[in-house]
Amino acid sequence: MKRKACGEGGINKVACNSLFIRYNSCMAITRRQKEVLDFLSGFTQKNGYSPSYEEIASGLGLSSLATVHKHVTNLQNKGLLQRAHNRSRSIDVLPARGNKRADRLPLLGRIAAGRPVEAIETAESISLGDIIGNREVFALEVRGDSMRDEHIVSGDYVLVERTRTAREGEIIVALIDGSDATLKRFYREGSMIRLQPSNTEMAPIFAPASSVSIQGKVLGVLRKYA
């Protein structure tokens, strides 16, 4: 696919449409800033949490943490990132701005999945904000079929509320031994945690409670058919 560049004059600017981030109006960012954005998006999608400055530097081959901090600060000033200064791993890529058409969708009525109902058009609308509210939420692309009996399959996107706690039976994003992230139902069994797949062909994961870190709990699922 041919990408439309954002450059003006002799300044080297990068293309606006990357795999993870698409903005309707081109925002002038350097090639290195785009690499930082793409690394942040890919790392967060894979692991369920954002990288540290050290991990960004290592992933991009940068020797100076001050350089990483400069790029992150510039991207934050341009409205492409946000940081929470009172917690670690708090660099989040912000969603695309300016796409008013996709911000809210018309809710035209209700459709029957059982007996037919009368189709009555309404003037309502719905957006992700109506589902998310003011909670801190990120999205992850699902890989694998361990949660297929919950109708969560490979290629789906789960909306995850960032939290460190969960109730018994909730579907969570768990980090095991600080490195392996997984999507499972959460159960405590004494000093152990059982991470239960929703797939009869797969066995549960048992791990000491001290080695399991909850990254968030699932609020909803998005699926694209075309």
Image (cartoon, rainbow, N blue to C red):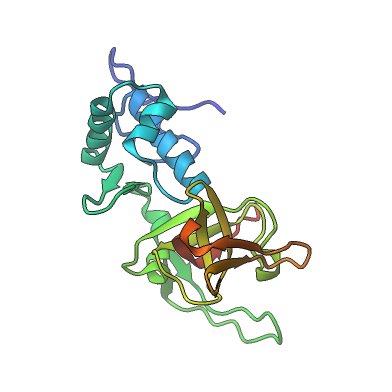
- Give the answer, above or below, for where 166 lies relative to 3: below
Q: Residue at x 66, y 65 (%)?
A: 197
Please say whether residue 86 is visible from this viewpoint.
yes
Which sits in the foreground, 161 or 187? 187
Q: Is residue 38 left or right of residue 74?
A: right
Q: Is residue 199 left or right of residue 81?
A: right
Figure quadrant of residue 58: top left
Q: Position of residue 7 (x, y in %)?
A: 33, 21
Q: Is residue 22 left or right of residue 89?
A: right
Q: Position of residue 43 (x, y in %)?
A: 46, 40
Q: How many marks?
A: 0
Q: Is residue 16 left or right of residue 85?
A: right
Which sits in the foreground, 196 or 198? 196
Q: Residue at x 33, y 17 (%)?
A: 12
- Give the answer, above or below, for where 14 lies relative to 85: above
- Which part of the image, by quadrant, shows the N terminus? top right
Figure quadrant of residue 207: bottom right
Q: Residue at x 35, y 22 (%)?
A: 62
Q: Position of residue 199 (x, y in %)?
A: 73, 66
Q: Residue at x 54, y 74 (%)?
A: 190
* Residue found at the very far right of the displayed protein: 201
Please say whether residue 20 is visible from this viewpoint.
no
